[in-house]
Amino acid sequence: MSEIGEFGLIDRIATLAETTLPAVPELLTGIGDDCAVYSPSAKLLQVATTDMLVDQVHFDLLTTPLRHLGSKAISVNVSDICAMNALPRYALISLAVPDSFSVQMVEELYQGMSHAAKEYGLAIAGGDTSSSRSGLFISISMIGEVAEEKLTRRSGAQPGELLCITGSLGGAAAGLKLLMREKEIMLNHIENNESYQRNVMADLQEYREAIQQQLLPLARIDIIRFFHSRHIRPSSMIDISDGLSPDLQHLCRHSNVGAMIEEGRIPIHGSTRRIADELQDDALTWALTGGEEYQLLFTIPKEEYRVIADNKAISVIGETTDRKEGVQLSDIYGMKIDLSSIRGFDHFNQ
Ligand SMILES: [Mg+2]
């Protein structure tokens, strides 16, 4: 890194960022001046979010390819933008990079970011780089846009509406457990001076889906485009970054409603169940408390169900209720469990 210096690095980053610009004509100036310049459409609201990823807190470089990490850092912000029923437009990226990183490593990280940005149709408009004495930090701020009549908050749910979730749950937690097991195997090999030649992604083929959900989650921008094309505005929405149970409780608290969800309706992929069996763990607990799913949880009035019924990526998991009913899960035997009694899944300390 010291060979090319900070300005050399910025030049290389700028080259990668420039490839994201054509998709966003409203961005008049990207990297290269003191500020990015964006020309917002007068009719749209802007939404803004920021998210920080910290080495050893949110990721482990032993089990995370840098390109995947870059992509994930973009996706987690896009997911928050999507949770407002908005579409992402541009991002500002700040990196603090340890001296042990080579230029190539920073470029790999950035390649993941610019690739993901292009997929989501947003521009990388600027940022900052610094050296770090304690691991890698990635901080991304993102701006999105939405028409006022489409904006969706956490607070709009009414009792008696349908609770819906996209995709399937538990896969990201399954992937994390597998990667932690893999890391242990790797460290044992290193300790015993044996060579470690497994390529995590290639040798764990059978677990591909779960590991991909952990390392390379995709924000559900497809669902937002579907909503817009069908003129659907959910009454409330949140993205599942902490886990279904805590995020459902957030939504209910903001909307001042209760909820009843049914275990049998929570979508859990067959491969997630197999991994849970193999690791002697519980797929339902992963689905309820495993974070980092980046699926969308939303409510719609019952009479609007027919508008979303044909979308296979959406499952109805229950209904909102009166606030005093609390937030409950009805298990497959019909037993009611208070979700606030279930402990959360803390990323590296579960
Ligand atoms: Mg969120």
Image (spheres, rainbow, N blue to C red):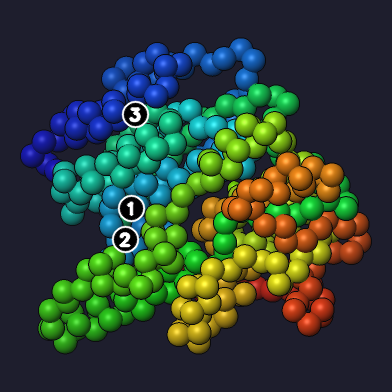
Q: Which residue is mark 1?
A: 68
State the CA–CA distance, disc 1 to disc 3. 17 Å
* 280 is higher (above) or lower (below) than 203: below
Q: Is mark 3 within 8 Å of ligand 1?
A: no
Instruction: Tell me the amino acid under the disc marked 3.
Output: Thr
* Quadrant containing the N terminus in the rendered view: top left
Side (left or right) of 159 relative to 36: right
Instruction: Tell me the amino acid under the disc marked 1.
Output: His
Instruction: Tell me the amino acid under the disc marked 2.
Output: Thr
Crowding near pointer 1: few (<14 within 10 Å), some, many (20+)?
many
- Residue 104 can be seen in this image: yes
Q: Which residue is mark 2?
A: 64
- Looking at the picture, how far across and down is residue 44, in whole percent? 62, 20
Along the line of sight, which residue is nearer the eye, 29 or 120? 120
Mark 3 or 2: in front is 3
Asked if the residue under mark 1 is in contact with the one under mark 2, i.e. CB atoms within 8 Å, the reply is yes
Q: Residue at x 45, y 54 (%)?
A: 217
Q: Which residue is mark 3?
A: 20
Q: Residue at x 16, y 44 (%)?
A: 103
- Looking at the picture, how far across and down is residue 316, in whole percent? 72, 57
Q: Quadrant of residue 167?
A: bottom right
Q: Is mark 1 within 8 Å of ligand 1?
A: no
- Looking at the picture, how far across and down is residue 213, in whole percent? 44, 60
State the CA–CA distance, disc 2 to disc 1. 7 Å
